[in-house]
């Protein structure tokens, strides 16, 4: 489809719209960037101009400081704007607060770049909205049919159940600082858990930010200065990278939990020494990836990152034109096996 | 089944012994009979289903999934049961009755092979992911959740104020689903009738010798024995007072009854005592390699040919009970004296005594350990993997008490080799490239090439594994299914310091040599591949000595 290639192509910096002169989620500084969401592998600092939802812009300034870009412009969800002769519209992606898909239209062709997305209910962000399109650009973080995320409420119940089983041990829950941590807290509150939840320092600012946007997280306290006995039977949240480092030793002998879609596979949980895997993901699982592709009605599917091979194979079985983009810089190489990138960047 | 699946799920992730016991005790406390009894049977390895095989599971999933998607998924997950449990498609109509564990076990026991696929498919339709995983693990054998029979019995004992040994004593008189056992520990019934004359007694284990130990330990307080490269076993026999039958049992060190695979040894247990010793295969009085012994392990039955060609033998090193008298509280020296007299009196060709190594100083013991052949082990030196140290005054205590027994393994040999191929691991290591084939240089100048000499899949830390995995991914030059060829030439490649226990001639390897028990002792990020070792180094080692010849599978 020549029109599609005109609208969107691949450069070393990432997806690029030649007719509009802008990148989407570039992995290195560019003149003009459209950003789908605030995770640091998608939202980097140092661009000339950034167009993103108000929440994503705010998250970027929380993380990088006010001067993270030369100029910023807020995009309202569902409100089209023009860049050259391209019609650009942001639609909710349901991934984290402020996350959006970006639809590009020109000459009767519509491409939707979904960024990262999920279809599961999440009380901390607007739900995913399906946008009909000709070309659908999808992630495939959990693009294998073994990934089917259970209802996240059941996972929160698992954690609360463990507090009763091990009331004398702190429960340390690894959760990415942006999105996952706040969603876990919201899930626990929904389940009726009213006790104070303790936070690693790296989570405090983003939780405050969520609360400033009207998302109630209940009583939260920093874990700083507390002793293991103060935390017995309590929930402590930290970024995944801190679960096994020196920091966690102050908790004595905690039950270690990790809230992640990777926890679906036992070996992955064991590799990280997790005792209580909580399968809570902010990405679409296999069933949702394939259902979403069908719902968009797209005849062509581009797979940005994750387990591209399986999803591309599935598309081709359905007669859809599909290709892997092998985008580097989101996660690591094709398999998404190297979580160190994700962990250090709280993806 | 769901509650059992939850238990297995939690056990599989729990590293702490006491927490495992707490999880099992909680289950036994809240789940009714006979469900919990079947769970106990599963946890103690007391169930077996002849007709259910992995092939059946493969066939079922092949009918329901795309082969490419299944292949990619299996490659990622690394475990058949788990892959199938996760991929199993949601049925159009989910059966509303989830099978209980009791139903699964009872049905499997009485179902004909041809009816199994339909029944299993119906169960898998009705269960959720965790339930399917548990069901498939149960059927294909081996729960692998890090629970020994002993640990499960300890959890049962916690239901009442009963010592685990008490459960062990009545165990062999019991039948699945153990209604009378639960009634007894919960104080609702009498002690089950079972004066087991040959119960399992948990073994005493040793600590590895560490740097500095010899500075503070007095050699005069210890005796030394060879550490044999076999399997630690407990042979128990005695006369039942009720039935007047003579019971004979051979236990693994975790209390599994492995007697069925060793009828030749059971025959030799014509006594009333409990012996701690090493299971070895002896031919013409010489200890055979561990590889030979391995052929006799993990079997439900044994052929007549195996009995003649690989006769089993016990080399005894301790006597725990004799004629009903519990000797475990006596000091080692006293037990040893009793053992020596006992073996002499029994005079059975399948039983002998593990000899003591005379030594006056740690230096002298180090010499013996370095050259067992010259220090008394004679032709059996190849089956020695180190020495054991035991305090004269040590009682026989279950578990791994501090300061009483030590094991001091032989020094491994090391060689610098170059990483050539990597393969995805299984189990815990699935999704990492964790099996590494490495080679050394042969030839010179333009003809120089690397020839593979072995494969190692442990010896590194989790952090190092991540780094190795990353190196493999960044330097892949070829893919063959799950195997990647990694760049390996004089300039670019990764040097691994490989430690191993022995070397043998091999026609299977292009290099002509094969390593025993190789593992990666260090990653030489600093060393250029051109400076790795040459095949001549290994050939010289082969000529110079006949080192130990096997891979120990079971520690102590």
Image (cartoon, rainbow, N blue to C red):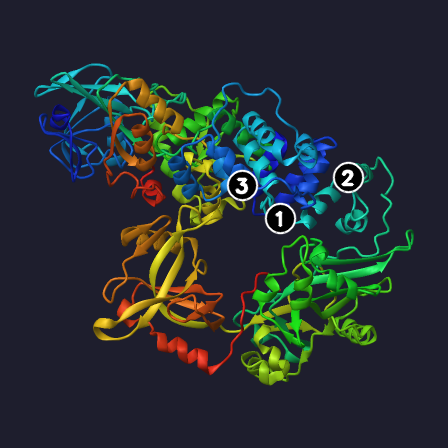
Task: Tell me the element at label 2.
Answer: loop
Q: Nearer the viewer, residue B59 or B148?
A: B59
| Residue of label 3 | B55
Mark earlier in primary sequence (2, 1):
1
From where the camera sits, is residue A291 visible?
yes
Task: Tell me the element at label 1.
Answer: helix
| Residue of label 2 | B178
Chain under disc 2: B
The residue drawn where x is 29% and y is 29% is A316
Residue B323 is situated, as x and y percent measured from the top left of the image, at: 87, 64
Q: Are marks 3 and 1 in contact (CB under 8 Å)?
A: no
Q: How far apart are marks 3 and 2 (CA)?
A: 31 Å
Question: Left of B416 or right of it: where is B371?
Answer: right
Q: How far apart are marks 2 and 1 (CA)?
A: 23 Å
Mark 1 neighbour class, 10 Å CA radius: few under 14, some 14 to 19, many 20 or more: few
Write down the quadrant of residue B338 in the picture. bottom right
Mark 2 neighbour class, 10 Å CA radius: few under 14, some 14 to 19, many 20 or more: some
| Residue of label 1 | B17
Residue B325 is situated, as x and y percent measured from the top left of the image, at: 85, 63
Above or below B30: residue B266: below
Mark earlier in primary sequence (3, 2):
3
């Amino acid at each position: 489809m020549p029109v599609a290639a005109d609208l969107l192509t691949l450069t070393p910096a990432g997806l690029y719209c030649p007719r509009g002169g802008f990148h989407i989620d570039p992995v290195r500084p560019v003149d003009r960037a459209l950003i789908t969401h605030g995770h640091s592998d998608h939202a980097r600092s140092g661009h000339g101009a950034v167009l993103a939802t108000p929440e994503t812009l705010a998250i970027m300034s929380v993380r990088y400081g006010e001067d993270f870009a030369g100029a910023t412009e807020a995009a309202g969800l569902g409100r089209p704007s023009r860049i050259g002769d391209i019609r650009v519209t942001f639609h909710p992606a349901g991934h984290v607060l402020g996350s959006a898909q970006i639809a590009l239209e020109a000459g009767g062709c519509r491409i939707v770049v979904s960024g990262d997305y999920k279809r599961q209910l999440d009380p901390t962000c607007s739900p995913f909205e399906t946008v009909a399109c000709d070309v659908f650009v999808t992630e495939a973080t959990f693009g294998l049919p073994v990934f089917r995320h259970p209802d996240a409420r059941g996972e929160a119940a698992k954690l609360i159940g463990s507090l009763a089983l091990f009331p004398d041990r702190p429960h340390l829950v690894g959760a990415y600082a942006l999105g996952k941590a706040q969603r876990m807290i919201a899930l626990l509150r929904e389940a009726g858990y009213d006790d104070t939840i303790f936070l690693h320092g790296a989570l405090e600012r983003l939780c405050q930010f969520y609360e400033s946007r009207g998302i109630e997280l209940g009583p939260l306290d920093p874990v700083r200065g507390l002793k293991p006995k103060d935390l017995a039977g309590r929930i402590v949240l930290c970024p995944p990278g801190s679960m096994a480092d020196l920091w966690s030793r102050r908790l004595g002998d905690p039950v270690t939990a990790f809230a992640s879609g990777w926890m679906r596979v036992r070996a992955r949980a064991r590799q990280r020494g997790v005792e209580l895997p909580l399968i809570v993901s902010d990405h679409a699982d296999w069933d949702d990836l394939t259902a979403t592709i069908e719902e968009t009605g797209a005849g062509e599917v581009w797979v940005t990152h994750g387990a591209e091979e399986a999803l591309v194979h599935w598309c081709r079985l359905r007669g859809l034109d599909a290709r892997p983009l092998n985008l580097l810089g989101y996660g690591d190489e094709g398999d998404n096996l190297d979580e160190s990138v994700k962990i250090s960047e709280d993806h | 089944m769901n509650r059992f699946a939850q238990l297995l799920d939690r056990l599989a992730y729990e590293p702490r012994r006491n927490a495992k016991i707490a999880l099992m005790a909680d289950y036994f406390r809240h789940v009714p009979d006979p469900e919990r009894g079947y769970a106990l049977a599963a946890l103690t390895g007391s169930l077996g289903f002849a007709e259910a095989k992995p092939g059946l599971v493969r066939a079922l999933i092949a009918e329901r999934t795309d082969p490419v998607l299944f292949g990619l998924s299996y490659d990622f997950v690394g475990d058949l049961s788990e892959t199938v449990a996760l991929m199993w498609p949601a049925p159009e109509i989910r059966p509303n009755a989830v099978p209980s564990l009791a139903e699964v076990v009872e049905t499997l026991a009485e179902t004909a092979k041809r009816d199994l696929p339909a029944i299993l498919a119906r169960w898998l339709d009705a269960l959720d992911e965790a339930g399917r995983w548990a069901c498939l693990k149960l059927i294909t054998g081996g729960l692998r959740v890090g629970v020994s029979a002993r640990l499960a019995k300890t959890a049962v004992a916690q239901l009442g104020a009963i010592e685990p040994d008490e459960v062990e004593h009545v165990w062999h008189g019991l039948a699945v689903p153990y209604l009378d056992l639960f009634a007894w520990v919960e104080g609702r019934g009498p002690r089950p009738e079972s004066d087991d004359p040959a119960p399992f007694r948990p073994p005493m284990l040793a600590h590895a010798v560490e740097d500095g130990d010899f500075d503070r330990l007095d050699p005069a307080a210890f005796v030394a024995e060879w550490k044999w490269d076999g399997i630690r076993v407990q042979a128990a026999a005695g006369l039942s007072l009720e039935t007047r039958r003579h019971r004979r049992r051979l236990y693994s060190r975790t209390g599994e009854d492995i007697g069925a695979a060793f009828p030749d040894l059971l025959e030799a247990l014509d006594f009333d005592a409990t012996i701690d010793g090493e299971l070895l295969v002896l031919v013409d009085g010489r200890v055979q390699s561990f590889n030979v012994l391995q052929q006799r392990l993990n079997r439900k039955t044994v052929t007549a040919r195996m009995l003649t060609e690989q006769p089993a033998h016990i080399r005894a090193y301790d006597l725990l009970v004799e004629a009903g008298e519990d000797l475990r509280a006596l000091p080692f020296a006293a037990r040893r004296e009793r053992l020596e007299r006992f073996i002499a009196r029994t005079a059975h060709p399948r039983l002998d005594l593990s000899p003591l190594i005379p030594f006056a100083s740690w230096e002298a013991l180090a010499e013996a350990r370095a050259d067992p052949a010259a220090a008394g082990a004679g032709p059996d030196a190849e089956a020695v993997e180190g020495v054991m140290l035991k305090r004269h005054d040590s009682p026989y205590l279950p578990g791994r008490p501090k300061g009483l027994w030590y094991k001091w393994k032989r020094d491994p040999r090391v060689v610098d080799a170059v990483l050539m191929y990597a393969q995805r691991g299984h189990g815990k290591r699935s999704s990492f490239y964790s099996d590494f084939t490495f080679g050394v240089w042969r030839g010179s100048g333009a003809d120089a090439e690397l020839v593979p000499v072995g494969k190692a899949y442990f010896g590194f830390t989790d952090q190092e594994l991540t780094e190795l995995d990353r190196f493999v991914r960044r330097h892949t030059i070829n893919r063959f299914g799950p195997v990647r060829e990694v760049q390996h030439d004089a300039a670019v490649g990764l040097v691994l310091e490989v430690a191993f226990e022995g070397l043998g001639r091999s026609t299977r390897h292009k290099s002509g040599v094969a390593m025993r028990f190789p593992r990666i002792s260090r990653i030489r990020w600093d060393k250029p591949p051109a400076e790795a070792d040459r095949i001549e180094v290994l050939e010289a080692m082969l000529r110079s000595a006949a080192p130990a010849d096997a891979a120990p599978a079971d520690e102590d």
